[in-house]
Each structure stands twice: as C-alpha cells, then as structure tokens.
Amino acid sequence: MPSRRNRTGSRMVEWRTSEGLVPYEEALAFMEARVAAIAAGEADEMVWLLEHPPLYTAGTSARAEDLTDPGRFPVHAAGRGGQYTYHGPGQRVAYVMLDLNRRGRDVRAYVRKLEDWIIAALAEFNVKGEVRPDRVGVWVVRPDRPAAADGAPREDKIAAIGVKLRRWISFHGIAINVEPDLSHFEGIVPCGISEHGVTSLVDLGLPVTMADLDLALKAGFARVFA
C-alpha cells in the first residue's frame, strides 16, 4: 500500500503500540521489512512502542570486556551504533523508522532530535534530562546521591539512544527507563560507561506508568519532528 499523506500533503507517521513482551528477533525482522517498504514508498514512517523480555544488545562498538555476566540474559548483535545496552520489562523502547531523505540527511541532527524528544517527554514529569558531549544518552543529576570521587554531582542515565540507517531510513531508536529492574544493568557496562549509574522514573520517586510516558512521547514527537 502506498504511503499516505495528511491534509497538508506531508506523509503520515504511523504509531504502533505492542502489548506484552516482543521477542528481539521478531522486532528486528519487522524493522528490516518496514524500512525496506518505506524506502520503496510502499509504507508510512513509523514509531513502534514496545517492551522486550530481559536481554542485552551489542552495538557495532561493543567491547567483549563490557559484558560482565555473559550467561545472565541472551545477548543479541543489534547492528546499530553504540556498545552494550539492556532491554527488559518496565523499559519503554521506541523504534523510530523515519525517512531522512526528506527530513534532512544529517545523522548528528537526527540524533539531536532524538535527544530533544526524550528531554521533552521527561519534562512532562518535571524531570530535567540533560546530554553530555562525551557520553551518549540522556542523563539526570542526582543531588540525592553521594557525589562522585572527584566531588562532581552524581549523574545517572535514564535513556539510551542507538540508531542505524539504511538508504537514509532510520531504525532502532531510544529506550527510556520507566520501572525496569535496575539490577539487570549490572551484567554489562552500559554503553561502555562505568563511572556513572542508571536510574528510572520510578527510581526518581515518580509513579509514572507506561501509558503516561507514551502520551508524553507522542506530544513531544509532534513538536520535535514536526
């Protein structure tokens, strides 16, 4: 089916939300097929919201020594950029399949928009997400936790970003921690960064549900990717 357009002539972005836990192999196969269809002009762009069963993914820059507990959960080669990442229940994964041929062939600008999107969604819950030039993902300052060894305020990662492009169609995307088991991150060095921790919205003391975050993501997407 050819891609649709709205009243302004812009192509539509389809939103899909999956209930339950989606196997990682199934998600990869779906993205591969959808990206090919978007490139061929046969399908709309898509944002897919889902959760995975507990697993680790290895990006193209993953280092063997950063997988500290190899037998804990299945490990999948993701094909995206980046290093090791955890996915599991309580974490909202958003796979973003957009046509950068018409949105601008600029990878850095696209990643910045993903960061801005996450920050906008977190702001709906009065959480100040921040980015750092030397660290991937979105971070929150934790004045309630002990400072780092050098006296700097502790910062915990609340969202991860990993992207891949094929024919300038994006896939993979972002993962925001709502209420995952944070101990599951202990089997890896998340994104190769060992000197900082990991947090979630519930860990920050916010009773946010997955449905709450989904609403914030949809509102923020409309502003950032308009």
Image (cartoon, grey):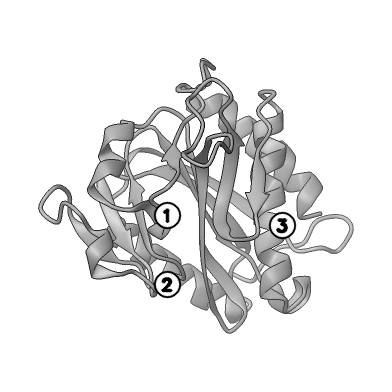
Marked residue nearer the N-terminal end (3 or 2): 2
Q: Which labelled disc corresponds to residue 113?
A: 3
Q: Nearer the viewer, residue 84 or 142?
A: 142
Query: Which residue is label 2 attached to?
Result: 32
Instruction: Give the residue displayed 68% in from the left and 32% down from the top.
Output: 128
The residue at the far bottom in this view is: 167
Alpha-carbon span between mark 2 and mark 1 = 29 Å
Query: Which residue is label 1 attached to?
Result: 193
Q: Nearer the viewer, residue 69 or 90?
A: 69
Marked residue nearer the N-terminal end (2 or 1): 2
Residue 80 falls left or right of residue 26? right
Q: Quadrant of residue 60?
A: bottom left
Disc 1 crowd, CA 10 A, few/some/many (<14, 14-19, 20+)? some
Q: Nearer the viewer, residue 216 or 7?
A: 216
* Amino acid tagged 3: Lys
Alpha-carbon span between mark 3 and mark 2 = 22 Å
Q: Secondary structure at mark 2?
A: helix
* Amino acid tagged 1: Ile
